[in-house]
C-alpha cells in the first residue's frame, strides 16, 4: 500500500481508457501517492471481525414485477447519438472477432 | 415582507400565490429580473429557462383561476443543480463530456416538484460530476460566493447555494455525496439538508457515488426545507434503494422550542482543526438551543479521523464505474476521427473529463484493481461499518448531534486548487454522515470575522429528519441574530 | 504418452422473462434495431436498475433443478470492462455470492451414467449486439438485447470428452426447457456455450494449460470444436510444445479453432458490489414456493415412463426429450389410448409430421384426445393402421376430428364379410396365376392377393377379414 509508480499509473489509465502525457503521469504519481499514503491510516484499525457495509440502508429483496413497459421510440433513443444511421448507434468498425 | 417577491421564502410565495395576493407570473418575473441583475456577478446559472418558467407560472395562475388544486409549491421558483435529468434544456453535469446532452426523461424529484406546482428557473453550476468542494471544477464557469465575490461558494452544489443566497431562486435542488449540499449551504449562509440515504429517490440524479449520493434542498429557511422535503421524500419504484417508509408532514413537526431534546456534541469535531472563530459561533448556537430547553451531552465518534480515507476509496471506486458509460458511443462528446473503438474511448474520455474527474477515476480504478481490492475497497467498507456504528451508539444518548459543517468559512477562489488532498480534508465534518447514511442539515449560525457565514450542522437518526428540522427551527426562531442578506446587486 | 481431456463448460442462457432484468423493455428479439430500448438499458446518465422478480425466481428454479444450494444471502456486482455492446461499460453480474451453487447434472454417454458437477449458476444481464455488415468502415450497435436476463451456469471440470460435453449440453437444455425458464435456442443465441479445455497425462492430478473455445453456434458444432481442440492440444504436447492460455474462436466453415485477440488488454474486471441494488435474500419459505412450481424433471420422468407405462428405454428417451412432447404423450394416454401404441404414434408419424412442417408441438392441430380417438378407431376395427396414417395426416393439416375425416372421405374399413367375400372372389378370378400357386402349396402367394384386395378397396378392407375370406374362397374353390 502507499507508493504508486509510473507503471501503476499507466496500468490504471489503460484500464480507465485515459491517455496521459508524461507530465500528467509524473504529477499523478505524486498526487496519488500522497492520497494513497494518507489512506494507510486505515491499517491502524483491526477490521478482521467487522462486516463490510455495502449500503447504509438495511434493505433486501426490492423487485419489480415482470411486466413490459413502453420503450423509447427509436428517434428518441438515438437522439443524442454522436453517429447513427437512424437504426443503429455507429462506431468505428470493430475488428475484434469477439 | 419586502415588496420584491424574490426576497421571499418559498412558503411566503406559496401563501401569497395561493391566496391570490400575487400572481405566480409576477413572482417568476421578479426572480428572472433578479437573475438578470445578479447572475453576471454570481455566475450561478448555466442555463436560464425564462420562457418556460413564465409558461409554468401562467399554468399555476390558470389552475388557481379555475379553482383547481395547485399543490404545496404553487408558483415557487426553483433552480436545479445541473445533474438532475430534465427533458427540458440540457443536462451536462457541467462537464464537457455531456455538452449538449438532452435527457429523454425527468428525474423523479423534478417530476415531484413539477406536480407540486413549482416553476423551474433553470440549471445551476456545480463541480464537474459533483466532484469538488468549491465549484471550481465546473467546465462551464466559476461561481462566486454572494457574500464575497472573491470567495468560492463551496461545492459541489455551489451554483445552488449561491443562487439561493443571492435570491436568484426561492430554493434549489442539490445533491450530497460527501457534503455537497451542506458545505456550500454553510459557505453561502443557506439551509441545506442531506436526507437519510433512501429517503429521496435518486432516479434521474446523475450518479457520482451510488451508495453515498442523496438529493436534498437548499433553502432560505428551515420551514422551506421542511416544505421541500414533504414534496421530495418517499418511495420511488424506479430506485431500488429508496425506502418504503412513511414520510409524514415535516412542516407539522416544526416547533419553536427544543424542550426535552438531548443534543450530542461530538468531542472529535471540536479539535484544533476547527477555527476559533468558527468554534465560537457553534458554541453560541448550542447555548441558544440550551436556552430553548435542550439538554447538551458530550458524545464520541471515535472513528471520525478515518472518514476521509474511507470516503475517498469508496466514492472514487463507485465513480470509476459510474463514469465509464461516458464513452462517446450513445451520447455526449465524441472525439473526432478516431480510427478504432479503443482510440475513440481514450480520446473521448481524455478530452471530455476535467483533471479532478480524471484523478478520481484513476484513484477509483486503482483501489479496485487486481490485488488491491482487499487492501482498499474491502477495508474501507469495513471501517465504514465502524463509522456507522459510532453514530448509532452516539444516538443512544441523544436525539441529534450538533457540530460545525466545515472547519473554515468559504475560502478564496484558487486557494486550494493546487492540493487535492487539502481540498479533500475540508470535507472532514460532512463525509462521515454520508458513510453512515444518516440525515444532516447545515444552517447559518452567524457571520465570522471575515464577514462570511458559518454553518451549524445538525445530524439526526436514520429517517428522523423531523427532529433535525425541529431543532433547526427552534434555533432559527430564537437565535437572535440578523445576518441580513448578501448585497450582490 | 496418453492424455486425457479436462473440460469445463460455461453456458449462458437467456431467461424467458417478458421484460428485461433491470427495466421494463420487452425481450422480443425480433424487433427492429433499437426499438426495445429505454434509458436504463441504454445506460443513460441518471438511470437505476430495478431487478425483475421473475428473473430471480427462474434462476432459483434452475438452481434447484440442478441440485444446487440456494444462497440465503446474495448480491449483484459490477464487472467492469469496456466494449461497445456494454451500455454502461460495466455488466451487472454476480461475483462472490451467486444465487445458486454446488449442484450437479447427470449425463449418459453410451449407456454409462455420470454426474457433472455444477459450480454455480448466477444471474447477469445480456449485452447489446454489434453488427459489422453495414459497410462504410463502421459497426452498428443494437441495444434490444442489452439487459435481457442471463443465467450463467458454470460446470466443474468433470467432462472428459467431446461426447460428454454434447451430452452435458443436451441434458442441461432439456432441464431448462422442462422448467420453462429458457428457450435454449443456440441458433437464436438464447443459449451460448464456451468450453475450457486442457489436456493432462492420464493419471495426473494437476491441470494442464487451458484454452477457452467460443463462437460455437450448435451443440454438434461444440462437439466438433472440442474434438478439434483436444487433437490440436495433443499434437502440441506430443511434439513437446506448450499450450498457450488463450481464447480461441470456432471457425465452423474451416472446422478449426482460431486464436482471438482478447477484448480487454488486461482482464482486470474490478468487481465490486452493485450499490444501486439491494441484496437478494431467498429464504426457506421463498425457496419452498419456487420448489413447488418445479415440474417433474427429465430423468425422473424417464424412469416413471418405463415403470408406469412399461415402455422401453429408447422410447422413454425419445418421448421425454422435450417436455411438451412428453406432456402430449401423457395426454394421449390419459384420453384412453394404450401407452405403447400412443408412444409409437407420437414418436413416429406425428413427430415426422411436426418435423416436416417445422411445427412446434404446442401448435400441433392434432389434439391429444383426437389422436387417442384415432387410435380407438383402429382398435375397434373402424379403420386400418394404414388408413390411419392418412387420417392422421389430414387431422394434422386441417385440425379435423378423426371421425370426421373417416366419414368425409369414406375411409371406414370394410368389415362386411359378404361384401369382402365378393371382392375376394373377383380378385381370385382376376389373378389365376397366384391363385393357382396358392392352391398348389405356395402359401406365400396369399400376400399378393391380400394386397390386391386392399388395392381394390382403396385400403379399406379389414386386413384380418380379407385374409380369412381369401383363404376360405381359395380353399373352397
Image (cartoon, rainbow, N blue to C red):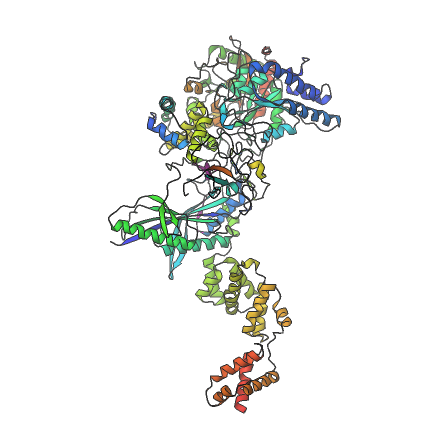
> Who is closer to the viewer here, A48 or B349?
B349
Residue positioned most to the right: B66
The stretch of residues the image draws in magenta is C66-92
Q: Give me the residue at 61% from left, 81% from top.
A: C416
Q: Is residue B253 visible?
A: no
Q: Give me the residue at 45% from left, 67% from top.
A: C312
Residue positioned most to the bottom: C477
| Image position of B269 (left or right of C365) | left
> Who is closer to the viewer here, B358 or C377?
B358
Where's residue C308, x and y in %? 49, 65
- Vertical position of residue B380 compared to residue C71: above or below: above
Residue positioned most to the front: C136
Q: Which of the 4 image quarters holds residue A94? A: top left
Q: Is residue B344 visible?
A: yes
Q: How many marks?
A: 0
Q: Give me the residue at 36% from left, 29% from top.
A: A10
Amino acid at each position: 500500500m502507499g507508493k504508486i509508480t509510473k507503471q501503476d499509473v499507466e496500468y490504471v489509465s489503460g484500464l480507465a481508457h485515459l491517455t496521459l502525457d508524461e507530465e500528467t503521469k509524473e504529477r499523478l504519481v505524486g498526487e496519488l501517492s500522497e492520497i494513497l499514503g494518507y489512506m494507510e491510516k486505515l491499517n491502524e484499525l483491526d477490521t478482521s471481525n467487522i462486516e463490510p457495509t455495502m449500503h447504509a440502508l438495511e434493505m433486501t429483496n426490492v423487485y419489480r414485477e415482470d411486466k413490459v413497459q413502453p420503450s423509447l421510440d427509436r428517434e428518441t433513443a438515438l437522439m443524442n447519438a454522436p453517429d447513427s444511421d437512424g437504426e443503429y448507434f455507429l462506431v468505428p468498425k470493430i475488428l475484434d472477432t469477439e | 415582507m419586502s415588496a420584491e417577491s424574490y426576497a421571499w421564502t418559498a412558503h411566503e410565495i406559496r401563501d401569497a400565490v395561493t391566496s391570490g395576493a400575487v400572481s405566480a407570473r409576477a413572482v417568476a418575473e421578479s426572480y428572472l429580473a433578479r437573475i438578470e441583475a445578479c447572475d453576471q456577478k454570481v455566475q450561478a446559472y448555466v442555463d436560464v429557462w425564462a420562457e418556460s418558467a413564465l409558461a409554468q407560472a401562467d399554468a399555476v395562475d390558470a389552475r388557481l383561476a379555475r379553482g383547481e388544486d395547485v399543490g404545496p409549491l404553487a408558483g415557487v421558483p426553483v433552480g436545479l443543480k445541473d445533474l438532475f435529468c430534465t427533458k427540458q434544456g440540457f443536462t451536462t453535469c457541467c462537464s464537457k463530456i455531456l455538452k449538449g446532452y438532452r435527457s429523454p426523461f425527468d428525474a423523479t424529484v423534478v417530476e415531484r416538484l413539477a406536480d407540486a406546482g413549482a416553476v423551474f428557473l433553470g440549471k445551476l453550476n456545480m463541480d464537474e460530476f459533483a466532484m469538488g468542494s468549491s465549484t471550481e471544477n465546473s467546465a462551464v464557469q466559476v461561481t462566486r460566493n454572494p457574500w464575497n465575490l472573491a470567495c468560492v461558494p463551496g461545492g459541489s452544489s455551489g451554483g445552488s447555494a449561491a443562487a439561493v443566497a443571492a435570491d436568484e431562486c426561492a430554493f434549489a435542488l442539490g445533491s450530497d455525496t460527501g457534503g455537497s449540499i451542506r458545505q456550500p449551504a454553510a459557505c453561502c449562509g443557506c439551509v441545506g439538508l442531506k436526507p437519510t440515504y433512501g429517503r429521496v429517490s435518486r432516479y434521474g440524479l446523475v450518479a457520482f457515488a451510488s451508495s453515498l449520493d442523496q438529493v436534498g434542498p437548499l433553502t432560505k429557511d428551515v420551514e422551506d426545507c421542511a416544505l421541500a422535503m414533504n414534496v421530495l421524500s418517499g418511495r420511488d419504484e424506479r430506485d431500488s434503494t429508496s425506502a418504503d417508509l412513511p414520510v409524514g408532514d415535516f412542516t407539522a413537526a416544526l416547533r419553536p422550542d427544543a424542550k426535552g431534546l438531548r443534543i450530542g456534541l461530538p468531542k472529535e469535531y471540536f479539535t484544533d482543526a476547527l477555527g476559533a472563530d468558527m468554534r465560537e459561533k457553534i458554541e453560541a448556537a448550542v447555548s441558544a438551543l440550551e436556552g430553548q430547553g435542550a439538554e447538551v451531552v458530550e458524545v464520541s465518534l471515535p472513528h471520525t479521523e478515518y472518514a476521509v480515507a474511507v470516503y475517498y476509496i469508496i466514492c472514487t471506486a463507485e465513480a470509476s464505474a459510474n463514469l465509464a458509460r461516458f464513452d462517446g458511443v450513445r451520447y455526449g462528446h465524441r472525439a473526432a476521427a478516431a480510427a478504432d473503438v479503443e482510440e475513440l474511448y481514450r480520446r473521448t474520455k481524455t478530452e471530455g473529463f476535467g483533471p479532478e474527474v480524471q484523478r478520481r477515476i484513476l484513484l477509483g480504478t486503482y483501489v479496485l484493481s487486481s490485488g488491491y481490492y482487499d487492501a482498499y475497497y474491502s477495508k474501507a467498507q469495513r471501517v465504514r461499518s465502524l463509522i456507522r456504528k459510532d453514530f448509532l451508539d452516539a444516538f443512544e444518548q441523544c436525539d441529534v448531534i450538533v457540530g460545525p459543517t466545515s472547519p473554515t468559512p468559504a475560502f478564496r477562489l484558487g486557494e486550494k486548487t493546487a492540493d487535492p488532498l487539502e481540498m479533500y480534508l475540508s470535507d472532514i465534518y460532512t463525509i462521515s454522515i454520508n458513510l453512515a447514511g444518516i440525515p444532516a442539515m447545515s444552517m447559518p449560525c452567524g457571520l465570522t470575522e471575515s464577514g462570511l457565514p458559518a454553518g451549524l450542522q445538525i445530524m439526526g437518526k436514520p429517517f428522523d429528519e423531523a427532529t433535525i428540522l425541529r431543532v433547526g427551527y427552534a434555533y432559527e426562531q430564537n437565535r437572535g441574530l440578523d445576518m441580513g442578506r448578501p448585497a450582490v446587486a | 504418452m496418453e492424455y486425457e481431456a479436462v473440460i469445463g463448460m460455461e453456458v449462458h442462457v437467456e431467461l424467458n422473462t417478458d421484460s428485461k432484468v433491470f427495466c421494463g423493455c420487452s425481450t422480443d428479439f425480433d424487433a427492429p434495431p433499437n426499438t426495445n430500448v429505454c434509458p436504463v438499458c441504454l445506460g443513460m446518465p441518471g438511470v437505476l436498475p430495478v431487478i425483475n422478480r421473475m428473473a430471480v425466481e427462474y434462476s432459483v428454479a434452475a438452481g434447484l433443478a440442478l441440485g444446487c444450494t440456494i444462497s440465503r444471502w446474495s448480491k449483484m456486482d459490477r464487472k467492469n470492462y469496456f466494449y461497445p455492446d456494454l451500455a454502461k461499460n460495466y455488466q451487472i453480474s454476480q461475483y462472490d455470492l451467486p444465487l445458486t451453487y454446488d449442484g450437479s447434472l447427470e449425463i449418459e454417454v453410451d449407456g454409462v451414467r455420470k454426474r457433472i458437477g455444477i459450480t454455480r449458476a448466477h444471474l447477469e444481464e445480456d449485452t447489446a449486439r454489434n453488427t459489422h455488415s453495414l459497410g462504410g468502415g463502421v459497426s452498428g450497435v443494437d441495444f434490444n438485447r442489452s439487459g435481457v436476463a442471463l443465467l450463467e451456469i458454470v460446470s466443474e471440470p468433470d467432462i472428459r470428452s467431446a461426447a460428454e460435453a454434447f451430452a452435458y449440453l443436451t441434458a442441461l437444455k432439456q432441464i431448462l426447457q422442462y422448467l420453462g425458464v429458457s428457450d435454449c435456442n443456440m441458433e437464436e443465441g438464447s443459449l451460448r456455450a464456451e468450453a475450457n479445455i486442457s489436456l493432462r497425462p492420464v493419471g495426473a492430478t494437476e491441470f494442464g494449460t487451458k484454452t477457452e473455445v467460443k463462437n460455437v453456434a450448435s451443440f454438434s458444432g461444440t462437439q466438433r470444436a472440442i474434438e478439434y481442440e483436444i487433437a490440436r492440444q495433443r499434437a502440441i504436447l506430443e511434439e513437446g510444445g506448450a499450450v498457450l492460455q488463450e481464447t480461441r474462436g470456432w471457425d465452423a466453415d474451416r472446422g478449426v479453432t482460431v486464436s482471438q485477440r482478447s477484448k480487454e488488454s488486461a482482464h482486470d474486471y474490478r468487481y465490486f458490489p452493485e450499490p444501486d441494488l439491494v441484496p437478494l435474500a431467498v429464504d426457506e419459505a421463498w425457496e419452498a414456493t419456487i420448489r413447488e412450481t418445479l415440474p417433474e424433471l427429465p430423468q425422473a420422468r424417464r424412469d416413471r415412463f418405463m415403470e408406469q407405462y412399461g415402455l422401453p428405454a429408447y422410447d422413454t428417451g425419445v418421448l421425454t426429450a422435450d417436455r411438451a412432447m412428453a406432456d402430449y404423450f401423457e395426454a394421449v394416454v390419459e384420453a384412453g389410448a394404450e401407452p405403447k401404441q400412443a408412444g409409437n404414434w407420437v414418436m413416429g408419424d406425428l413427430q415426422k409430421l411436426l418435423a416436416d412442417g417445422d411445427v412446434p408441438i404446442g401448435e400441433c392441430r392434432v389434439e391429444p384426445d383426437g389422436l387417442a380417438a384415432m387410435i380407438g378407431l383402429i382398435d375397434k376395427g373402424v379403420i386400418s393402421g394404414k388408413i390411419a396414417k392418412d387420417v392422421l395426416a389430414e387431422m394434422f393439416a386441417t385440425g379435423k376430428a378423426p371421425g370426421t375425416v373417416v366419414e368425409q372421405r369414406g375411409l371406414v374399413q370394410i368389415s362386411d364379410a359378404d361384401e369382402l367375400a365378393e371382392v375376394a372372389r373377383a380378385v381370385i378370378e382376376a389373378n389365376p396365376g397366384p391363385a393357382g400357386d396358392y392352391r398348389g402349396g405356395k402359401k406365400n402367394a396369399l400376400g399378393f392377393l391380400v394386397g390386391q384386395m386392399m388395392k381394390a378397396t382403396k385400403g379399406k378392407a379389414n386386413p384380418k377379414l380379407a385374409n380369412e375370406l381369401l383363404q376360405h374362397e381359395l380353399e373352397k374353390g
